[in-house]
Structure formats: structure tokens, C-alpha cells
Image (cartoon, rainbow, N blue to C red):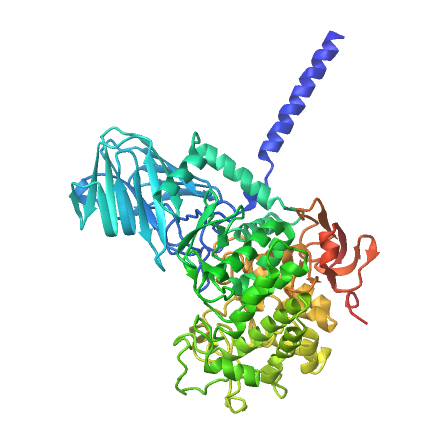
């Protein structure tokens, strides 16, 4: 009996150890994230391997233009905006102090980076660097191998640095009188602190101006240093509080462990099973990108707003900024509605607060840390307001959001990249229902028009038509009958530029004549900005998200509509790649004239669903996802604006997509994974099963939703948010009858 008991205990111990090893080796969601994906751009801006916690204020990445660069510009302490350069810089150095400079270009090797950690070996300096991050503070561990004196160079590119005997504090002035503050504490006190000014060491414990630099000197024989710091947009005292609140008693390893858990909880809101490893990497990397922006800048219940230059109480609600709404409204905001609705409510509430804080009560368009930069065209914040409200989010003031949106569209100029009041162009739009275009070579005379961005008359007319549809829908929700009718009528303004002969949206002059001669690929100058915007007429041909049935009718019905879609994917560039991209550098990721690299294209592959050929949506999506989004350094086709494009990948990989934010439905695509579960945050889960899905089996044969046959290529928001199960049967050949509306 005793032998049997002993054997059982041994067997149990073996099984326990085996399970522990398996669990330790089991990949969690964050383990599939590859921050290097897309770090070499196809043409313009690459992604950056950003280390941060979800939607948090402190973000850093190795400071280099892209992955090909063989030098690091010091060690970053804070990136103030998406794609921004480091606000503060730390350069550890061993050697002759005569060689000290504000920022060192480090040769490096053995770089390892995750969303929550960083390590790198500075091989010429022989310094090992390890980094851990929190929300508003972080820490470096530095290991030194040489037996020489150590110097730490702290640089504020445009600001002030001060040593108080225990810590360095200071600020950097960025744009719009906004300052980012630093409070940095070395674990070991230095032997001496001096200023580095114009290449010379000066006896001083403070520095101010361009490249304000202080140098901490340590004795020969120092082998390890730990550096902790906090950042703030309020003041240096708050930066110190942020450090103490988040880092007290924590090591770099502790921060990395905590960050890993936070990321797993966040990414784990969507669980996937099946698919190839690379497909999982692309999925979770894309989901990670969706949490890079916007960022909460609330600090202990307060925040600094660059929208009025004042510190505010946040009244228990985080204040978010750095959100490029022109593209994030399309899928990133709708994704957050599903998996993080309370944050989405806080973000929209922040938009309303921004509008209240600015001189004019206008909904922001590109809210950043430094205020609203008013970039791009149209005012798509209204779409996110409508989409959230229609999908049941209520924790924001709809009346104020509507008023701010209405004023932004009717009082601010519609001219792109401008925050000026409405003028001559806007008056013309209100009277004639379109933005007038200039002929090639005709001189611009309207002051609110940006010299480089130009009028973008077709893009602005189409985008504003959608915005006005959104206004009409919110007005209807609020019982504002007159406004609802006014803006509903204006939502058809896209018709005013439709050329029935060519079936393109075609710019008109101020007399109502189509601009001729005209080339739908190349007319409009750099980026087609004279008529469209970054993309050419082939992309803006489909920019009627709010009324696709009417667009189908304008083109003569389903057959003609599908033929035009097909033509876009087969139409050649028209010139060599060199000459094409010299004119249209944002229009990369081409399949014919289709551009996977720019956000106005994201809904286009789903349009076949509306014209009776869903199988072509399925075919196109699988081609686009597999060719243009890959687990490699060039695996993102164009400018990824911190989630705007990546959210398309997340939705499309799951098998559905919000073609029209503001409509309570999603268009069906082609699910990649065997199983997906979405934690909706309301105690319910939406599940997707795709039986037999594979690279070959990309076509939907049949589908059921909660046990009932699904015969249409879309599902309602209620079907998702109330929890349930969507099951697809997949096959290698198209079932051309599935999803066709009779």
C-alpha cells in the first residue's frame, strides 16, 4: 500500500512538473507581437518598434529613422507624439571626457524589444542596457564592462536641466508652448555634475536652451547604474510624483513582468486559435498597434491641456489625446467600441472637452499632445460620435458633441489642413453642394487654402457629404427635425461631382463644368491634391460609405458596379513605378490602381458584398492580407498611423468589418482563424468558428448565427454585443450563391 502511494505521488509530481514546463513554454498573446513588423517602409514612413503600455502617456522607441540604420541616437526617455523624436535623451559614455557630446550615435547589437521591455548591447562602448516601462515612468539598468570613468549625458533638446544633489529635473519645450517635464533619479550619486556647453565642460548644475546638457560623472570601477525617471506634462513636481507612485520598490525586471501581464490582459480580449504562426503574429502585432494611440495624459486626477494651455481636474475620467481621427474613425474607434467601450466613451468625452477648451467650439480633427493640428481633410470625429452612440455608448454628452461637430463643419473652413473660419470656398459649398476646383496652372487666390495641400475638392466634397450624413443621424437622435432634414439633403452632395459618362467623381470648376482634359490617375499634381488627396480618382470613386446602394445606382446597377471594382484591381499604373510614386507616394501597396497603403481604401474590398458577389470580397481580402501584411520588416504596406490601418487587419482577420461607422452592422469577409472569441467587456463573448478555413479554403460555403442560417453577407451590432456564435463552413471554391441578396 505504501509503495502504491509513493508511486502515485511520484507520478503526480512528474505530471505537475510536465504541466508547469508546458505552461511556461506556452505562448501568450504578447509573445506573438513583433514590433519590428513594418520597420522598413515601402516608400514613406515606417512603423516604429514602440515600447509602451496600452494607451499610456510614456512611449519610447530606439531613435533611428528605420530599421536599416546601424546607429542609435542615444537612449530615449520620452517620445511626445506618435512618430515624434525623443524629447529627452540619455547617453552613457566611457572614455575621454574631451569626446563628450549632447547625443551619442551608438553602434549596437543584440537588440531585443517587446511592447513592455527593451535590451541592447552598445558594442563599441561595451555597455549592456535593459529597460522597463510603466504608464508615466520608467527605468534603465546599465552594466559597464570597461574599467574607465563613466559619464551620463542628459540632454533636453530645447529646455532646461537642473541637478539638486539627488536628481535631475527639467523640461523640454515642444510645440504650442507645451512642455514635457522630467524628474530623473540615479540610484548611485555621481562624483561630480557639470554642464556640457558648446562642447566644453562648465562648472554648473543647471543648463538651459538648445541642447541643454548636464553630465553626471562616476568614478572608475563603477560597473552598474540604475536610472529611474518620471515624466509629466504638468510640472517637475508631478513628474516626481509619477515616478514615486509607479516605481517605488520596483526593479526593471518587476516593470517588465508587470508590463507583460498588462499587455496579455489587453491583447487577450481577443483570443484566436488555428492559423499559421505568422498569421497570429500579424494579428496580435496589429492589435498591439491599435493601443498605441490615443494616450491618457491624466496624472493623479489632473491633466495639462494644450487646447487652452491650462491644467484641469479630470473629475475622475482620464483625458485622452493624440488621435488622428481622419483615419482612426474608420475601424480603430469601432474596434474599441467592441472591446473597450468605457475607454471609447472617455475618448469622445475628451473630444468634447477639447472643443470647449479651444477658442471656437469646434470638434477636433487631429488632436495631439500639443493641441489640434487640423490636418488632412473633413471632420470625421462626428462619425465616431454617431457610431458610439448608435452602438449603445452613453457616457458622454451627445448634445455637446453634436454642437461641436456641427460648428466644425459649418463654421470652420472645409479647406484641408486649415483651422481658419469658413470663407469663400465654404460659402460656395453651401450654395452649390461641392467644392470648386481650379484648372491645372490656375493660381490659387483663397487665403484659407494650404499652399501644398491645395483644395482637394473631390475628397472634401465626398468626405463632407458623409460627415453631414452623420450630423443628420445625430440630429434625428436628438429630435432636431430641421437639422436632420437639412443635413440629410446635404449628404447627397457627392452626386454633384459624379460624371455619369465616365462613372468617376470628377472635379468641377466654379461654373459647374467638369475639368477637362483629365486623367483619373495623375491629374492633380503631387498626391493628386489639386483634386483628391494622397490617392487618385480610382480610390475616391468609392468614397460614399454612407450610401453605397445609391452609388451602385449611379453606376448603373450591380453588374456595372462590380465591373468598375474589378477594373480598379486590374488597371495598370500607367507609368513606371518610379514615375507613378514620384506623383503618388502615398498610393503604395498597389493591386492595379487599388492602394492597400492608405486608409480611404480600407472599405473597398467589402463593396462586392453590396452588389451580389460576396465571393469576390472573400477572394480580394485574402490576397490583400497575405501579400501586404506579413511578419517581416516590410510587412506593412504604407503609413500606419498608430492603429488606423492595423484595425483593418484585426477586423478582417476575424471575418467582418465596419464599412460604415454609424450603421449598426458589419460586412462579412473571410475568416482566417479556426476560432475567435471576443470579450465584449459586458460579461458576454462573441465567438466565431470557421470550419476548414485555410489558405486554400477562403470561400464561405454556408454560415449560421446562433444556430440559424445566415444568408446575408453582414451581421448586426446587436448580434455581436449580446454575445453569440457565428459559424462558417469554408471551402476552396467559391459558393457564388452564398450571401447574394435576392
In the image, residue 276 sits, relative to residue 486, either above or below, namely above
Residue 377: x, y in percent?
A: 50, 71
| Quadrant in which residue 191 is drawn | top left
Q: Which quarter shows the C terminus?
A: bottom right
What residue lies at 41% left-to-right and 75% top-to-bottom? Answer: 450
Residue 611: x, y in percent?
A: 72, 73
Q: Residue furthest top?
A: 2
Residue 61: x, y in percent?
A: 41, 49
| Quadrant in which residue 623 is drawn | bottom right
Q: Nearer the viewer, residue 431 or 203?
A: 431
Marker count (numbered): 0
Residue 233: x, y in percent?
A: 39, 49
Tell me if 96 is positioned left or right of 26 in this view.
left
In the image, residue 333 sits, relative to residue 565, either above or below, namely above
Tell me if 506 is positioned left or right of 189 in this view.
right
Whether residue 474 appears in this view of the structure is: yes
Tell me if 666 is positioned left or right of 244 in this view.
right
What residue lies at 67% left-to-right and 82% top-to-bottom? Answer: 554
| Quadrant in which residue 245 is drawn | top left
Q: Residue furthest right?
A: 708
In the image, residue 728 sits, relative to residue 22, either above or below, namely below
Whether residue 595 appears in this view of the structure is: no
Q: Nearer the viewer, residue 668 or 312?
A: 312
Q: Which quarter shows the N terminus?
A: top right
What residue lies at 35% left-to-right and 47% top-to-bottom? Answer: 181
Amino acid at each position: 500500500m505504501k509503495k502504491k502511494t509513493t508511486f502515485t505521488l511520484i507520478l503526480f509530481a512528474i505530471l505537475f512538473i510536465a504541466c508547469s514546463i508546458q505552461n511556461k513554454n506556452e505562448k501568450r498573446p504578447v509573445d506573438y507581437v513583433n514590433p519590428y513588423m513594418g520597420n522598413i517602409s515601402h516608400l514613406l514612413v515606417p512603423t516604429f518598434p514602440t515600447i509602451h503600455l496600452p494607451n499610456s502617456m510614456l512611449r519610447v522607441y530606439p531613435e533611428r529613422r528605420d530599421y536599416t540604420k546601424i546607429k542609435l541616437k542615444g537612449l530615449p526617455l520620452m517620445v511626445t507624439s506618435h512618430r515624434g523624436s525623443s524629447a529627452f535623451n540619455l547617453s552613457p559614455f566611457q572614455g575621454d571626457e574631451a569626446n563628450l557630446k549632447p547625443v551619442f550615435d551608438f553602434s549596437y547589437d543584440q537588440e531585443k524589444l517587446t511592447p513592455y521591455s527593451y535590451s541592447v548591447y552598445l558594442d563599441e562602448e561595451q555597455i549592456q542596457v535593459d529597460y522597463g516601462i510603466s504608464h508615466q515612468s520608467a527605468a534603465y539598468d546599465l552594466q559597464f564592462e570597461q574599467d574607465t570613468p563613466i559619464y551620463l549625458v542628459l540632454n533636453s533638446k530645447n529646455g532646461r536641466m537642473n541637478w539638486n544633489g539627488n536628481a535631475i529635473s527639467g523640461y523640454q519645450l515642444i510645440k504650442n508652448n507645451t512642455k514635457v517635464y522630467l524628474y530623473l533619479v540615479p540610484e548611485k550619486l555621481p562624483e561630480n555634475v557639470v554642464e556640457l556647453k558648446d562642447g566644453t565642460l562648465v562648472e554648473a548644475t543647471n543648463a538651459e536652451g538648445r541642447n541643454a546638457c548636464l553630465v553626471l560623472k562616476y568614478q572608475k570601477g563603477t560597473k552598474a547604474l540604475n536610472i529611474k525617471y518620471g515624466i509629466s506634462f504638468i510640472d517637475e513636481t508631478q513628474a516626481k510624483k509619477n515616478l514615486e507612485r509607479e516605481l517605488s520598490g520596483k526593479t526593471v525586471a518587476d516593470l517588465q513582468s508587470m508590463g507583460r501581464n498588462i499587455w496579455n490582459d489587453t491583447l487577450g480580449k481577443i483570443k484566436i486559435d488555428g492559423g499559421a504562426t505568422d498569421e497570429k503574429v500579424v494579428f496580435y502585432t496589429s492589435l498591439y498597434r491599435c493601443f498605441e494611440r490615443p494616450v491618457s495624459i491624466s496624472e493623479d486626477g489632473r491633466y495639462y491641456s494644450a487646447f487652452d494651455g491650462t491644467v484641469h481636474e479630470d473629475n475622475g475620467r482620464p483625458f485622452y489625446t493624440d488621435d488622428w481621427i481622419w483615419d482612426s474613425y474608420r475601424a480603430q474607434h469601432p474596434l474599441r467600441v467592441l472591446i473597450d467601450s468605457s475607454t471609447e466613451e472617455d475618448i469622445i468625452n475628451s473630444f468634447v472637452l477639447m472643443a470647449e477648451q479651444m477658442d471656437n467650439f469646434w470638434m477636433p480633427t487631429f488632436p495631439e499632445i500639443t493641441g489640434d493640428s487640423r490636418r488632412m481633410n473633413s471632420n470625421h470625429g462626428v462619425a465616431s460620435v454617431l457610431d458610439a452612440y448608435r452602438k449603445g455608448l452613453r457616457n458622454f454628452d451627445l448634445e455637446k458633441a453634436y454642437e461641436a461637430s456641427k460648428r466644425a463643419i459649418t463654421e470652420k473652413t472645409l479647406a484641408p489642413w486649415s483651422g481658419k473660419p469658413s470663407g469663400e470656398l465654404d460659402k460656395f459649398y453651401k450654395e452649390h453642394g461641392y467644392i470648386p476646383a481650379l484648372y491645372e496652372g490656375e493660381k490659387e487666390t483663397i487665403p484659407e487654402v494650404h499652399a501644398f495641400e491645395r483644395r482637394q475638392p473631390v475628397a472634401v466634397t465626398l468626405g463632407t457629404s458623409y460627415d453631414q450624413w452623420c450630423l443628420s443621424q445625430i440630429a434625428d437622435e436628438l429630435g432636431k427635425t430641421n437639422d436632420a432634414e437639412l443635413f440629410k439633403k446635404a449628404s447627397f452632395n457627392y452626386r454633384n461631382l459624379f460624371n455619369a459618362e465616365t462613372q468617376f467623381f470628377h472635379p468641377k470648376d466654379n461654373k459647374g463644368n467638369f475639368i477637362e482634359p483629365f486623367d483619373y490617375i495623375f491629374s492633380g499634381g503631387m498626391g493628386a491634391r489639386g483634386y483628391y488627396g494622397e490617392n487618385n480618382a480610382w480610390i475616391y470613386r468609392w468614397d460614399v460609405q454612407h450610401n453605397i446602394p445609391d452609388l451602385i445606382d449611379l453606376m448603373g446597377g450591380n453588374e456595372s458596379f462590380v465591373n468598375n471594382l474589378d477594373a480598379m484591381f486590374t488597371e495598370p499604373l500607367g507609368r513606371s513605378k518610379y514615375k507613378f510614386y514620384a506623383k503618388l507616394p502615398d498610393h503604395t501597396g498597389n493591386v492595379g490602381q487599388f492602394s492597400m497603403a492608405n486608409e480611404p481604401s480600407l472599405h473597398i474590398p467589402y463593396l462586392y458584398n453590396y452588389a451580389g458577389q460576396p465571393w469576390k470580397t472573400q477572394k480580394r481580402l485574402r490576397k490583400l492580407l497575405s501579400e501586404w501584411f506579413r511578419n517581416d520588416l516590410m510587412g506593412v504596406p504604407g503609413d500606419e498611423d498608430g492603429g488606423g490601418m492595423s484595425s483593418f487587419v484585426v477586423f478582417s482577420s476575424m471575418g467582418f468589418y465596419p464599412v460604415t461607422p454609424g450603421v449598426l452592422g458589419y460586412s462579412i469577409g473571410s475568416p482566417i482563424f479556426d476560432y475567435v472569441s471576443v470579450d465584449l467587456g459586458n460579461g458576454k463573448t462573441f465567438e466565431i468558428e470557421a470550419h476548414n478555413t485555410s489558405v486554400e479554403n477562403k470561400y464561405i460555403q454556408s454560415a449560421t448565427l446562433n444556430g440559424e442560417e445566415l444568408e446575408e453577407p453582414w451581421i448586426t451590432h446587436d448580434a455581436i454585443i449580446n454575445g453569440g456564435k457565428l459559424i462558417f463552413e469554408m471551402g476552396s471554391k467559391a459558393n457564388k450563391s452564398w450571401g447574394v441578396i435576392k
